[in-house]
Image (cartoon, rainbow, N blue to C red):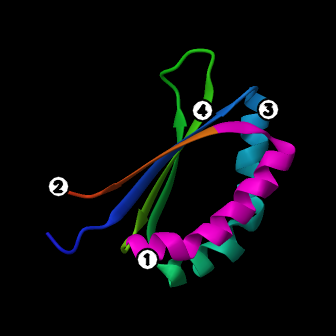
Amino acid sequence: MSDPKLVNYTTADFATKSDMEIALYKWKEVRDQVMPKLKAKGLTRFTILRIWNKEGVFRIGYLFEYRDESAYKDCQEIWQQQENRTQENAPAKIFANRGIVLEDNY
């Protein structure tokens, strides 16, 4: 395995389906401008998941993979701006989990 990567898995719970859809729409509005900046700072992967196995919950999962801890830190200002923008229109409860990859089988 190559050098360990930093992975962040974050979930965002929205009060309504509409709030969740607004958050996704707001991201799509800026995605093409933001992603190149993040990649330049060391983001290697970004995935959005619609969590569907929790009835009555409007939850999105975000998987972030960074080159290393330094890349993670370098990207935080950009992500904070995006989170603030989303929270204005679609407030969510956000839960983040971070770790170093120990084993990756694919």
Q: Which residue is mark 2?
A: 103
With respect to residue 11, does 26 lie above or below? below
* Residue at horizontal 43 percent and vertical 77 percent from the top: 70
Query: Residue 4 got which mark?
Result: none
**Disc 3 versus disc 4: distance between alpha carbons?**
12 Å
The main secondary structure of the magenta stretch is: helix
Where residue 45 sits: x, y (%)?
A: 44, 65
Mark 1 vs mark 3, CA separation in Å: 35 Å
Q: CA distance from mark 2 to mark 4?
A: 27 Å
Magenta stretch in the rendered image: 69-93
Label 3: which residue? 18
Q: Secondary structure at mark 2?
A: loop
> How far apart are labels 2 and 1 at the CA level?
20 Å
Question: Disc 2 residue type?
Answer: Glu
Does the magenta segment cover residue 84? yes
Q: Which residue is mark 4?
A: 59
- Considering only order in the chain, which callout, 3 or 1, is on the residue closer to the N terminus? 3
Which residue corresponds to the image point at 62% horizontal and 22% vertical from the top-left? 57
